[in-house]
Amino acid sequence: MFKEFNIENLKQSKTILEEKLQKSRAAIDKLLLIENKSYDNFVKPYQEIAEEVSEYVTPLFHIDSVKNTKLTQKVQEEIIPLLSAYETDIAQNEHIYTSFIDIQSNNKSTLNSIQNKVVKNEIRDFKLGGCGLDEKNKKRLKQISLRLSELSNKFSQNLLDATNSFEMTTENFDDVKEIPASDLELAKGEEEGKTVYKFTLQMPSYIAYMTYGSNRKLRENIYKAYTTRSPENEKIINEILKLKQEKANILGFKNYAQYSLSTKMAKSENEVIEFLYELAKKGKDKAKKEVEELQVLASKDGIKKIESYDVSYYSEKLKKEKYDIDQEYYRPYFEQNSVLDGFFDFLNKTFDIEFKKSSAVTWDEKVQVFDIYEKGKISSRIYIDLESRKDKKGGAWMNNWHTHYIDSHNKEHLATAFIVCNFPPSKGNTPSLLRHDDVVTLFHEMGHALHHLLSKVSEPFISGISGVAWDTVEFPSQFLEYFAYDKEVLKLFAKHYKTKEILSDEAIDKIIKAKNFQSSLAMMRQLEFALFDFKLYQKLYSEDEVQTLLDEIREDISAIIPPKYNKFQNGFSHIFSGGYSAGYYSYKWAEVLSADAFYLFLESNVFNKELALKYKESILQKGGSADMEQLFFEFANRKPTVDSLLKIDDIIS
């Protein structure tokens, strides 16, 4: 039913992949010999060939992210050129391309809407891969694709190496006196018989000192280390920008931003820029007032000008002052396993899905696996890896492995996915205690996972998150986040891990009231990233121009300007080693959809089963089988409006 996660032959990955790719090429060549090609005899088996390759390579990339070693790095270096060459060869294969065109023209009246969507998407993607170009340009595109894959991998590895190379140690308890006990226990160590406290750039450790570290010099020290990571990535960025501009030009686009939009919901560069500036205009004044509030608090400590490395520290103090909310108080109520159990209960009540623990093989003893059942029948599997480790890359993400589809022999294939986070690790008798922010992150990644796992689409290329426009793919994840602030939902799992006492109404009300604390400041930060990303790909910037662009955007919209040494771009993995190049705006774009969808629940109630199942049927089960505009209208019976987002975030009334 499910393939087990197995990397026992990791050292032989290159040889195995070579054999699989050779077999795939031969299978495609055989398909091309079919005289009267149809959807059933060509398109369906063609998709299955691609799925087989994807199912093999996904764990190889995944293990490098979650159990990074010299061996996994070596495997990456070996398989990336093979895979890049194979994918480019396929993407530029004129015979496959013309086969799809012929099938579209000869069978248009007999293809259903889902089949038409597959064929339409493939024809578009073959054009974007270089079909129709001369051999010289095809060859150059192939070289560019390979080099971009190598640079992306190198960017990510540099960042992980830099993250792991820094350690800040203090013996002075006054430097750590405000740090919560659970975080302090993780930082505590011993050197030469003395108690010392060590902090790293791993997220739980970094956040702990930035939020509670009493020593301003140490806060700046760790902040500076974080924001100056991987200076060698500057050269990588310059090369990535040149190659992406060249790629876009070869394919007939003015710039890479245009190329990026060719597969997205947004229709033009102007539409994206105007959308981002509309939000900035509505949020900037309130964001500045939020910084002024922090300055008042910092002034009491003799700080004349608040800096970026002060923001988290004084924000936590202000939050406590305003809402009497103490993050440390809540963490015993958000023990990892309790949160998961209650979260699964909520998802069962909402979407009629049941999670059952599986004993499937994993890559780490702390990874948990669950099989998902619908109406008593197994439908998908999810791997959940929540705790931070030194050999795990930072951040949080969902990675799809298998995709739901019905194959040529009418056999149903079930979906699988990985959720990866970097939450505070369990240590000895101390369990993994989450912040409420961590809970929100878990809801977010589960939103992505369910979008993939609950698909009922029969064609793999548009099932789950496959074929979903990139600027709408965050919709289901952000939508689920909102439920992490609902009182009745929180009561399902907010239980003290020792006493089993449920978090009080008063304590939950504080979380809800504090939800929009500094919402304008947070939005302006996202808009800074989004504008930098999108403008960066509208023309070719090089060397110092990249920093100049970022400085100009900060000057224009940012409520607080970071220190000159801040080289944020060298760690901006979303756009330089992820899939968000000229697409980071997608977070805000999709947030408009998610906020508007959630408003329907606010207008009734969050446990509106009928509405939840309609969302499941219209959005989650349909994957990329139709454009999200169409699916959203099918669900909400209206077009989304930006005002829902601004109201939910309390930016406008």
Image (spheres, grey):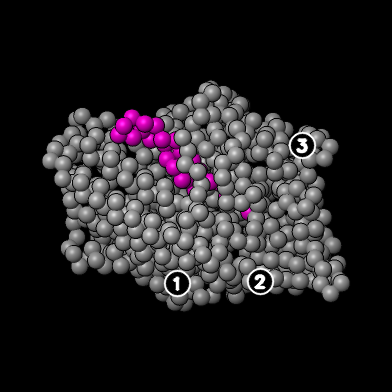
Q: Quadrant of residue 294?
A: bottom right
Badge 3 density bin: few <14, some 14–19, many ≥20, Cα 10 Å: many
- The residue labelled by disc 1 is 236
Badge 2 density bin: few <14, some 14–19, many ≥20, Cα 10 Å: some
- The residue labelled by disc 2 is 166
The quadrant of the image that shows the C terminus is: top right
Q: Which residues are magenta?
A: 399-422
Residue type at numbered disc 3: Lys
Residue at 24% of width from left, 56% of height from top?
92
Could you give the CA–CA distance between mark 1 and mark 3, rounded to whole angstroms?
Answer: 47 Å
Q: Quadrant of residue 297?
A: bottom right
Question: Which residue appears farthest toward the left when viewing the image?
Answer: 35
Nearer the observer, disc 2 or disc 1?
A: 2
Residue at 36% of width from left, 31% of height from top?
411
Q: Position of residue 38 (x, y in %)?
A: 19, 36
Could you give the CA–CA distance between mark 2 and mark 3, rounded to whole angstroms?
Answer: 36 Å
Using the image, determine if residue 455 lies above or below residue 18.
Answer: above
Whether the magenta-drawn stretch holds residue 147 is answered as no
Residue at 45% of width from left, 51% of height from top?
58
Q: Can you tell which mark lies on residue 653? A: none
